[in-house]
Amino acid sequence: MNLRNLSLPHSIVAGGAAFVLAVWLSACAPTSPDFDSDAASLLQSSVAIVTDAAAVGDPVAALAALDVLQAQLNENTSTGAIGAERSARIQASLDLVRADLTAALPAPSPTTAPADESSNDNDNGNGNGKGDDKKDEKDDKDDKGNKKD
């Protein structure tokens, strides 16, 4: 079940992620030779941290704990403490939980663009640096364009 397609409050989504992890936690029990008991204990502790964070509606903390869990899974798989088949099943669960927790993240707050710093401080916009000088020159001439004294 993918919780991110539902219109549910973030706490319910996080609770769903916690449930998935709880089910996964029971699957971590070292019942086969392809799963070292020390590795299982370490992963179970990490799953509990993810579950706790998700249960209180903190997807950011849950995702951070999930990153730690992911690193532990990778390490234990590479050393052979967890067999490839079991590792693949665990990875599939982690991927589902990550997707649900990511969907539960709060929406980013809208950012405002910085105010336009250019201003129209009485310059004529022609870039010659003369500003209102032409206006002043116009005021110095009579109706026929002759310069006033």
Image (cartoon, rainbow, N blue to C red):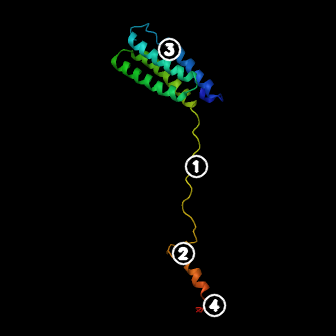
Q: Quadrant of the N terminus?
A: top right
Position in image of residue 142 (x %, y %): 63, 90
Residue occupied by mark 2: 131
Asked if the residues shown at circle 3 and circle 1 are in contact, with their CB atoms under 8 angstroms apart, the answer is no
Asked if the residues shown at circle 1 and circle 2 are in contact, with their CB atoms under 8 angstroms apart, the answer is no
Q: Label 4, label 3: how many angstroms apart (C-alpha)? A: 94 Å
> Considering only order in the chain, which callout, 4 or 2, is on the residue closer to the N terminus?
2
**Amino acid type, callout 4:** Asp
> Considering only order in the chain, which callout, 1 or 4, is on the residue closer to the N terminus?
1
> Considering only order in the chain, which callout, 3 or 4, is on the residue closer to the N terminus?
3
Mark number, residue 112: 1
Mark whose residue sits in front, 2 or 3: 2
Mark whose residue sits in front, 1 or 2: 2
Q: Residue furthest front?
A: 149
Please, is residue 4 above or below residue 24 in the view? Answer: below
**Amino acid type, callout 2:** Gly
Asked if the residues shown at circle 2 and circle 3 are in contact, with their CB atoms under 8 angstroms apart, the answer is no
> Considering only order in the chain, which callout, 1 or 3, is on the residue closer to the N terminus?
3
The tally of labels here is: 4
Pick the front one: 40 or 79: 40
Residue occupied by mark 4: 142
| SS assignment at label 4 | loop
Report crowding for label 1: few under 14, some 14 to 19, many 20 or more residues within 10 A (C-alpha): few
Residue drawn at point x = 43 percent, y = 24 percent = 68
**Amino acid type, callout 3:** Leu
